[in-house]
Image (tube, grey):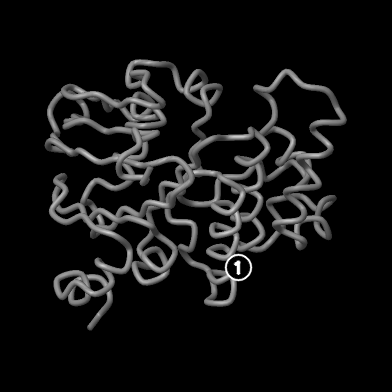
Protein backbone atom coordinates (compact mmCIF):
# COMPACT_ATOMS: atom_id res chain seq x y z
CA UNK A 1 0.00 0.00 0.00
CA UNK A 2 1.35 3.44 -0.91
CA UNK A 3 2.02 6.15 1.69
CA UNK A 4 -0.78 8.19 0.15
CA UNK A 5 -3.24 5.33 0.68
CA UNK A 6 -2.26 4.91 4.33
CA UNK A 7 -3.68 7.06 7.08
CA UNK A 8 -1.49 10.07 7.86
CA UNK A 9 0.34 10.08 11.18
CA UNK A 10 -0.36 13.81 11.59
CA UNK A 11 -3.39 15.59 10.16
CA UNK A 12 -3.95 19.33 10.47
CA UNK A 13 -7.59 20.01 9.60
CA UNK A 14 -8.50 23.52 8.46
CA UNK A 15 -7.13 25.25 11.55
CA UNK A 16 -7.35 28.92 12.40
CA UNK A 17 -5.01 30.43 14.99
CA UNK A 18 -5.58 33.72 16.78
CA UNK A 19 -3.18 35.58 19.07
CA UNK A 20 -4.39 37.85 21.87
CA UNK A 21 -8.02 37.11 20.86
CA UNK A 22 -7.58 39.51 17.93
CA UNK A 23 -4.76 38.71 15.50
CA UNK A 24 -5.64 36.02 12.94
CA UNK A 25 -2.43 34.28 11.88
CA UNK A 26 -3.49 30.98 10.32
CA UNK A 27 -6.55 31.00 8.07
CA UNK A 28 -7.76 27.47 7.39
CA UNK A 29 -4.48 25.53 7.15
CA UNK A 30 -4.74 21.84 6.25
CA UNK A 31 -1.85 19.43 5.72
CA UNK A 32 -0.78 15.84 6.32
CA UNK A 33 2.43 14.15 7.42
CA UNK A 34 2.79 10.41 6.87
CA UNK A 35 4.87 8.26 9.17
CA UNK A 36 8.52 7.84 8.30
CA UNK A 37 8.49 10.81 5.92
CA UNK A 38 10.09 14.25 5.81
CA UNK A 39 7.67 17.09 5.10
CA UNK A 40 8.87 20.67 4.56
CA UNK A 41 6.86 23.83 5.18
CA UNK A 42 8.05 26.87 3.21
CA UNK A 43 7.06 30.50 3.38
CA UNK A 44 8.32 34.04 3.88
CA UNK A 45 8.88 35.55 7.32
CA UNK A 46 5.52 36.10 8.97
CA UNK A 47 3.69 33.56 6.80
CA UNK A 48 2.78 31.47 9.86
CA UNK A 49 5.28 28.61 9.66
CA UNK A 50 6.37 28.62 13.31
CA UNK A 51 2.77 29.16 14.39
CA UNK A 52 1.83 26.01 12.48
CA UNK A 53 4.45 24.00 14.35
CA UNK A 54 3.38 25.44 17.70
CA UNK A 55 -0.24 24.62 16.97
CA UNK A 56 0.88 20.97 16.73
CA UNK A 57 3.13 20.96 19.82
CA UNK A 58 0.59 23.13 21.73
CA UNK A 59 3.19 25.75 22.64
CA UNK A 60 0.83 28.50 21.38
CA UNK A 61 -0.64 29.16 24.79
CA UNK A 62 2.68 30.38 26.14
CA UNK A 63 2.47 33.16 23.52
CA UNK A 64 -1.26 33.90 24.08
CA UNK A 65 -2.26 32.05 20.95
CA UNK A 66 -4.94 29.41 20.44
CA UNK A 67 -6.46 27.18 17.79
CA UNK A 68 -9.96 28.62 17.42
CA UNK A 69 -11.22 26.47 14.53
CA UNK A 70 -10.33 23.12 13.05
CA UNK A 71 -8.36 20.33 14.70
CA UNK A 72 -4.95 18.65 14.94
CA UNK A 73 -4.87 14.84 15.02
CA UNK A 74 -1.90 12.59 15.73
CA UNK A 75 -2.16 8.87 15.10
CA UNK A 76 -5.96 9.11 15.09
CA UNK A 77 -6.29 11.17 18.29
CA UNK A 78 -7.19 14.82 18.52
CA UNK A 79 -4.40 16.65 20.39
CA UNK A 80 -4.94 20.38 19.89
CA UNK A 81 -6.41 20.81 23.39
CA UNK A 82 -3.76 18.74 25.18
CA UNK A 83 -1.05 20.06 27.49
CA UNK A 84 2.35 20.37 25.76
CA UNK A 85 3.85 17.78 28.13
CA UNK A 86 1.20 15.25 27.09
CA UNK A 87 1.99 15.92 23.44
CA UNK A 88 5.65 15.12 24.14
CA UNK A 89 4.69 11.90 25.93
CA UNK A 90 2.54 10.99 22.92
CA UNK A 91 5.63 11.22 20.72
CA UNK A 92 5.89 14.75 19.25
CA UNK A 93 8.88 16.93 20.15
CA UNK A 94 9.55 20.42 18.80
CA UNK A 95 13.06 21.80 18.31
CA UNK A 96 12.52 25.53 18.62
CA UNK A 97 14.01 28.18 16.37
CA UNK A 98 17.07 29.81 17.92
CA UNK A 99 18.99 26.83 19.37
CA UNK A 100 17.46 26.94 22.87
CA UNK A 101 19.91 25.22 25.21
CA UNK A 102 20.45 25.43 28.96
CA UNK A 103 23.60 27.55 28.82
CA UNK A 104 24.70 26.74 32.38
CA UNK A 105 24.51 22.97 31.83
CA UNK A 106 27.01 20.82 29.98
CA UNK A 107 26.22 19.42 26.55
CA UNK A 108 25.58 15.99 28.03
CA UNK A 109 23.38 17.38 30.82
CA UNK A 110 21.35 19.19 28.15
CA UNK A 111 20.91 15.93 26.26
CA UNK A 112 19.81 14.07 29.38
CA UNK A 113 17.04 16.61 30.05
CA UNK A 114 15.39 15.31 26.87
CA UNK A 115 14.76 11.97 28.58
CA UNK A 116 13.11 13.57 31.62
CA UNK A 117 9.58 12.46 30.66
CA UNK A 118 10.60 8.81 30.16
CA UNK A 119 10.33 6.31 32.98
CA UNK A 120 13.18 4.03 31.92
CA UNK A 121 16.40 2.68 33.40
CA UNK A 122 19.89 4.10 33.16
CA UNK A 123 21.06 1.50 30.66
CA UNK A 124 18.36 2.49 28.16
CA UNK A 125 19.20 6.17 28.61
CA UNK A 126 22.90 5.38 28.08
CA UNK A 127 22.06 3.49 24.87
CA UNK A 128 20.07 6.44 23.54
CA UNK A 129 22.87 8.84 24.50
CA UNK A 130 25.35 6.75 22.52
CA UNK A 131 22.94 6.88 19.58
CA UNK A 132 22.89 10.70 19.73
CA UNK A 133 26.67 10.74 19.79
CA UNK A 134 26.64 8.52 16.69
CA UNK A 135 24.58 11.15 14.87
CA UNK A 136 26.70 14.00 16.26
CA UNK A 137 30.28 12.84 17.00
CA UNK A 138 31.27 16.43 17.76
CA UNK A 139 28.93 16.46 20.76
CA UNK A 140 30.73 13.48 22.25
CA UNK A 141 33.96 15.47 22.12
CA UNK A 142 32.23 18.43 23.76
CA UNK A 143 30.07 16.47 26.21
CA UNK A 144 31.64 18.10 29.28
CA UNK A 145 31.59 21.67 27.91
CA UNK A 146 29.03 24.21 29.08
CA UNK A 147 26.48 24.54 26.27
CA UNK A 148 26.59 28.32 26.45
CA UNK A 149 30.25 28.25 25.41
CA UNK A 150 29.83 25.98 22.41
CA UNK A 151 29.43 27.13 18.80
CA UNK A 152 26.08 27.84 17.15
CA UNK A 153 26.32 24.61 15.19
CA UNK A 154 27.08 22.60 18.32
CA UNK A 155 24.15 24.21 20.12
CA UNK A 156 21.84 23.28 17.24
CA UNK A 157 23.12 19.70 17.37
CA UNK A 158 22.55 19.70 21.13
CA UNK A 159 18.96 20.91 20.66
CA UNK A 160 18.24 18.18 18.10
CA UNK A 161 20.02 15.56 20.22
CA UNK A 162 17.96 16.55 23.27
CA UNK A 163 14.79 16.00 21.22
CA UNK A 164 16.03 12.56 20.18
CA UNK A 165 16.52 11.60 23.83
CA UNK A 166 12.73 11.74 24.23
CA UNK A 167 12.49 8.93 21.64
CA UNK A 168 9.95 10.86 19.55
CA UNK A 169 7.83 9.45 16.77
CA UNK A 170 7.82 12.88 15.13
CA UNK A 171 10.22 15.83 15.38
CA UNK A 172 9.10 19.37 14.54
CA UNK A 173 12.24 21.19 13.36
CA UNK A 174 12.01 24.99 13.26
CA UNK A 175 14.77 26.70 11.23
CA UNK A 176 17.58 24.21 12.05
CA UNK A 177 20.01 25.79 9.57
CA UNK A 178 19.49 29.42 10.59
CA UNK A 179 22.78 31.28 11.00
CA UNK A 180 24.96 28.26 10.31
CA UNK A 181 27.88 27.98 7.90
CA UNK A 182 27.19 25.95 4.72
CA UNK A 183 29.26 22.98 5.95
CA UNK A 184 27.23 22.79 9.16
CA UNK A 185 23.98 23.11 7.20
CA UNK A 186 25.04 20.03 5.22
CA UNK A 187 25.71 18.17 8.48
CA UNK A 188 22.31 19.06 9.91
CA UNK A 189 20.44 17.94 6.80
CA UNK A 190 22.53 14.77 6.55
CA UNK A 191 21.32 14.00 10.07
CA UNK A 192 17.73 14.69 9.00
CA UNK A 193 18.14 12.07 6.26
CA UNK A 194 19.64 9.62 8.76
CA UNK A 195 16.70 10.14 11.13
CA UNK A 196 14.29 9.32 8.33
CA UNK A 197 16.27 6.15 7.63
CA UNK A 198 15.75 5.29 11.32
CA UNK A 199 11.97 5.72 10.81
CA UNK A 200 11.63 9.05 12.62
CA UNK A 201 9.07 11.37 11.03
CA UNK A 202 10.23 14.97 10.44
CA UNK A 203 8.13 18.09 9.92
CA UNK A 204 10.58 20.78 8.89
CA UNK A 205 10.51 24.56 8.59
CA UNK A 206 13.57 26.24 7.11
CA UNK A 207 14.35 29.41 5.15
CA UNK A 208 16.88 27.38 3.14
CA UNK A 209 14.22 26.14 0.73
CA UNK A 210 16.65 24.30 -1.52
CA UNK A 211 18.12 22.27 1.34
CA UNK A 212 14.70 21.60 2.86
CA UNK A 213 13.11 20.42 -0.40
CA UNK A 214 16.15 18.34 -1.30
CA UNK A 215 15.45 16.07 1.68
CA UNK A 216 11.64 16.36 1.73
CA UNK A 217 9.25 13.72 0.48
CA UNK A 218 6.52 16.35 0.40
CA UNK A 219 6.28 20.10 0.86
CA UNK A 220 3.75 22.83 1.47
CA UNK A 221 4.04 26.56 0.76
CA UNK A 222 2.40 28.95 3.20
CA UNK A 223 1.55 32.56 2.34
CA UNK A 224 -0.12 34.94 4.80
CA UNK A 225 -1.54 32.11 6.85
CA UNK A 226 -2.82 29.93 3.99
CA UNK A 227 -1.43 26.91 2.14
CA UNK A 228 -1.08 27.98 -1.50
CA UNK A 229 0.99 25.12 -2.94
CA UNK A 230 1.62 21.46 -2.14
CA UNK A 231 3.55 18.70 -3.84
CA UNK A 232 6.50 16.36 -3.62
CA UNK A 233 9.93 17.79 -2.86
CA UNK A 234 11.11 17.42 -6.49
CA UNK A 235 7.86 18.92 -7.81
CA UNK A 236 8.22 22.02 -5.67
CA UNK A 237 11.92 22.36 -6.54
CA UNK A 238 10.89 22.45 -10.21
CA UNK A 239 7.91 24.77 -9.67
CA UNK A 240 8.49 28.19 -11.29
CA UNK A 241 6.71 30.05 -8.48
CA UNK A 242 8.85 28.35 -5.82
CA UNK A 243 12.04 28.82 -7.84
CA UNK A 244 11.41 32.55 -8.17
CA UNK A 245 10.19 33.23 -4.65
CA UNK A 246 12.42 30.94 -2.57
CA UNK A 247 15.34 29.75 -4.69
CA UNK A 248 16.37 33.06 -6.25
CA UNK A 249 15.97 31.75 -9.80
- In depth, the one of 245 and 127 nearer the eye is 127
Which quarter of the picture shows residue 4?
Answer: top left
Which quarter of the picture shows residue 22?
Answer: top left
Q: Is residue 91 depicted above or below 129 in this figure?
A: above
Which quarter of the picture shows residue 78?
Answer: top left
The residue wearing badge 1 is 187
Q: Is residue 29 left or right of residue 130?
A: left
Q: Is residue 27 depicted above or below 185 in this figure?
A: above
Task: Residue at 56%, 45% (x, y): give it.
Answer: 199
**The N terminus: image quadrant:** top left
Task: Residue at 53%, 64% (x, y): give it.
Answer: 189
Q: Is residue 107 left or right of residue 224?
A: right
What is the x, y in percent for residue 149?
Answer: 72, 57
Q: Is residue 119 depicted above or below 112 in this figure?
A: above
Task: Residue at 60%, 48% (x, y): give it.
Answer: 160
Mark 1 residue element: helix
Mark 1, Cα crowd under 10 Å, few <14 / some 14-19 / many 20+, is: some
What is the x, y in percent for residue 207?
Answer: 35, 63
Amino acid sequence: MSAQAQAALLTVNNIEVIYDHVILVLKGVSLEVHGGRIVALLGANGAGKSTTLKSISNLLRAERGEVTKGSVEFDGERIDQWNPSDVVKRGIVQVMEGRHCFAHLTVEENLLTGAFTRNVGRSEIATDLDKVYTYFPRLKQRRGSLAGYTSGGEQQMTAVGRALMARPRMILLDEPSMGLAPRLVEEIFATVRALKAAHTTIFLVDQNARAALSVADRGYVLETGRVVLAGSGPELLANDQVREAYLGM
